[in-house]
Amino acid sequence: MKPIKVGLLGIGTVGGGTYTVLKRNQEEITRRAGRGIVVTMIADRDLDRANSFADSGVVVTGNAQDVIANPEIDIVVELIGGTTIAKDLVLAAIAQGKHVVTANKALLANHGTEIFSAARGKGVMVAFEAAVAGGIPIIKALREGLTANRIEWVAGIINGTANFILSEMREKSLPFAPVLEQAQKLGYAEADPTYDIEGVDAAHKITLMSAIAFGVPVQFDKVYMEGITKLTQEDISYAEELGYRIKLLGITRRVEKGIELRVHPALIPANRLIANVEGVMNAVMVKGDAVGATLYYGAGAGAEPTASAVIADLVDVARVQTADPANRVPMLSFQPDALTDTPILPMEEVETACYLRLQVIDKPGSLAEISRVLADFNISISAVIQKEVTSEGGPVNVIMLTHKNPEKDMNAAIARIETLSIVTGRVTRIRIEELEG
Ligand code: HSE
């Protein structure tokens, strides 16, 4: 069979890795795919960079449209990023009847419905394993490996930069800012680092996993997002004292009323495997009704780990290129006419246990006043610690763990606690996720 021809749009970190790994493992990849997979065109604004990779016979261009217009190209690999030019190029490639492989989570989280529908209309595939958790084959696991299950929840450490920052803060007792700088130097951070630290990147990824897990459309506009910029080392060490680690989690869970979809820091029991995922590594837990809890771990970014996912998609496309489109694995796992409109729940309706840190004036009745407010909102306390006074007459840190409660009650309780004269400053609230198998 003739080799399948690939055009790369963008030869930065992931594009370079893809080119290198495809070449290095060409023989084995051909044996697996049943035919060769060759890059015959590269488009990049930096022609020198593109030429430094291109072997003889590979056409290099500064114009991505040249790749899309070339009838010889079977698969377009979009590694440009962003949601504007990349969107136009992906839709143009689909319109030309080309399959698309992309690592662009922002694009699919925001415009997935339009892109998948265009692809179905043309009978082509849009494959995106590299968009979620880099080299971990989590899309394949959710879409194919776990199809027997009713998925109950998915929870993941899916931003390496944020995880690296939290690990360094905990292990080396470092503050936030210098660790972020270090992460950027190591090349893991998104072009806009706020995407990493404010939870946006993780939200893109959990949006895609939620759609695949529950058979709902991609709905990035409904994700609750809270990043790690307000976390202090104090909270990290108090959490540790209580037997927890703080991680930035992407969570999606099916509950009676709908689907939870959220990204925020969470306390996880330190003895869970996932709590011990450190540095830039990623991990995703999936709980299915039949299989129970499963855990997927690996590199969530980097040239060759992400290339591993891009190439797996290329092999998938090569294998099914000739298959009847109606019998292919659906792009979002569920058949397109079988998606449901189960609502994504507003955060106010989500129920979690919480860690609260309050600065309290140390005098008789203070704890009673706070407990009264919590009781008024039906919030039950599961643990309390009070730290020693650091300055004479100054406030003390009181840490409370609560049982599960609806977010709206906790919001109201916190607002009322902040008005008490014995409480100084804001209340820190970090949600707790037990992630029980
Ligand atoms: N910026 C991302 C991270 C990398 O830190 O995990 C790829 O999504």
Image: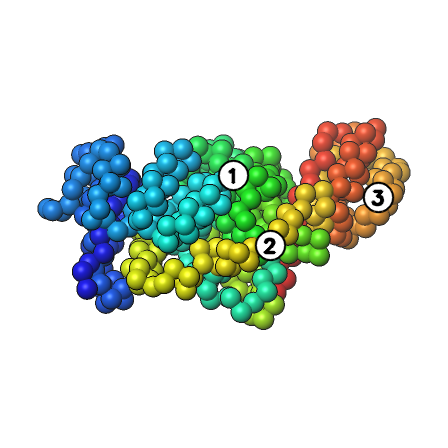
Q: Amino acid at mark 1?
A: Val
- Which quarter shows the C terminus? bottom right
Residue type (three-letter) at the residue carrying disc 2: Thr
Please name whichever residue, 193 or 423, is drawn nearer the observer in this view of the structure: 193
In the shown orientation, is residue 19 left or right of residue 310?
Answer: left
Q: CA distance from mark 2 to mark 3?
A: 34 Å
Q: Which marked residue is nearer to the observer: mark 2 or mark 1? A: 2
Distance between mark 2 and mark 1 Cα atoms: 25 Å
Question: Mark 1 — residue?
Answer: 200
Q: Position of residue 436 (x, y in %)?
A: 63, 62
Residue indicated by mark 2: 340
Q: Is residue 126 left or right of residue 270?
A: left
- At horizontal 22% and vertical 63% (from top left) the residue drawn is 35
The quarter in which the N terminus is drawn is bottom left
Q: Which disc is residue 377 wearing?
A: 3
Q: Is residue 64 above or below residue 3?
A: above
